[in-house]
Amino acid sequence: MKNRKILVTGGAGFIGSHVIRRLVNRYSDYHIYNLDALTYAGNPENLIDVENSLNYSFVKGDITDENLINDLFSNYRFDSVIHLAAESHVDRSIKDPLAFVKTNIIGTINLLNAFKNLWNGDFEDKLFYHISTDEVYGTLGDEGLFTEETSYDPNSPYSASKASSDHFVRAYGETYELPYVISNCSNNYGPNQFPEKLIPLFINNIIAMKPLPVYGDGNYTRDWLYVIDHATAIDDIFHKSNLHETYNIGGFNEIKNIDLVKQLCDIMDKKLNRQIGTSQQLITFVKDRPGHDYRYAIDASKIKEDLGWKPSVTFSEGLNKTVDWYLDNKKWLDNVTSGSYRSYYKEHYKL
Ligand code: NAD
Ligand code: TYD
């Protein structure tokens, strides 16, 4: 369909900014509206290269503000929503679950209601695309993969809030015939990720020769996907998926945290001209995260078979590109690691 008016929520964040860049640059006949509250994780600098594009508009606003959301939908009449805005960090959810309930659950319901009320059953060529996480499935043991049929079993306040929002989206599909799709992606990494998540936090600490706080014994496993490959998958799902589908997105790319951290240390030693082994000495085992999920791993065969999507880079290529980006963008890193970031870091890690 031509001339779409797409509301992207959370577009100033990590994944959202890559999604916006892709849509703005690829679809000149679409208009992309980015609604973002600019919390600590939202950064307009992430979109500096597209901010003056004619098919892009930024609106600063909070998805928990029901009146604002209703006004925006009636003024702009969005035919589609790609909903990424969320509180997204597990450690923060352990400290303040209610913030996650407000944004991830109430915020999602506000968007669903505004979309439903605007189109009032006339849903032809309309789409509500909800971006979710594999963490809703809970944890795996040493074997097996999450498929789209795996039961939800969330363990953290973050994943419980995302699971709840997924359920509401599905419930609106069943109850009001709201046209939706949902995707559940594995851990992302890449440029513009806020340095509270494992990879950018450790890149930042390696640059500064600060301790690398590995939780527990480091044997926890995550399945990593380069963020630009996630943005490609979102584009494919948005354009090609049937309604009421769910897709798991992942790179078949599992690695134990401790092995990842060692690989990262060695890449950075080379790039920083440090003797190999220097950064590994910064590894510090710290108290485990409560309720820490042991292993995530995604079976991404459905999206591959149905839509022909596959990741474009290997983990090693993606990690090298990511490190290069952070080394080339020290100013970005310095800007986001000032102020409230410092107090969060100090309080959480006590390092
Ligand atoms: P992020 O924390 O980097 O960005 C979130 C964005 O949402 C920020 O720009 C923030 O300002 C905005 N936001 C937060 N609360 C808001 C509110 N109340 N109103 C409006 N805007 C608000 O997150 P991310 O890593 O880019 O994740 C984006 C989405 O993808 C989330 O829904 C997350 O659950 C999901 N996801 C993330 C990952 C991952 O590894 N990062 C993996 C799978 C799914
Ligand atoms: P994170 O990037 O927070 O993503 P998620 O919890 O959503 O998977 O963490 C990735 C893994 O790294 C997870 O097993 C927790 C671990 N981790 C550490 O060991 N130390 C840290 O300082 C952080 C932030 C994470």
Image: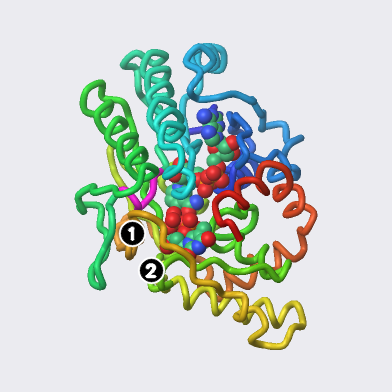
Which label number is shown at residue 293?
1
Number of numbered discs: 2
Q: Residue at x 73, y 36 (%)?
A: 53
Which label number is shown at residue 330?
none
Does residue 23 appear left or right of residue 103 in this picture?
right
Q: Residue at x 39, y 16 (%)?
A: 119
| Along the viewing direction, whichever of 180 and 136 lies nearer the viewer | 136
Label 2 packing within 10 angstroms: few (<14), some (14-19), many (20+)? some
133 in the magenta segment: yes
Q: Is residue 294 above or below residue 98?
A: below
Which label number is shown at residue 220?
2
Secondary structure under badge 1? Answer: loop
Give coordinates of residue 56: x percent, y percent: 66, 32
Pointer 2 residue Cβ closer than 8 Å to ligand 2: yes
Give coordinates of residue 264: x percent, y percent: 59, 75
Q: Residue at x 53, y 69 (%)?
A: 313
Earlier sequence position, callout 2 versus callout 1: 2
Location of residue 262 (image quadrant) = bottom right
- Between the C-alphas of marks 2 and 1, the distance is 8 Å
**Contact (Cβ within 8 Å) of mark 2 with mark 1:** yes
Q: Which residues are magenta?
A: 132-136
Q: Quadrant of the C terminus?
A: bottom right
Give coordinates of residue 336: x percent, y percent: 70, 47
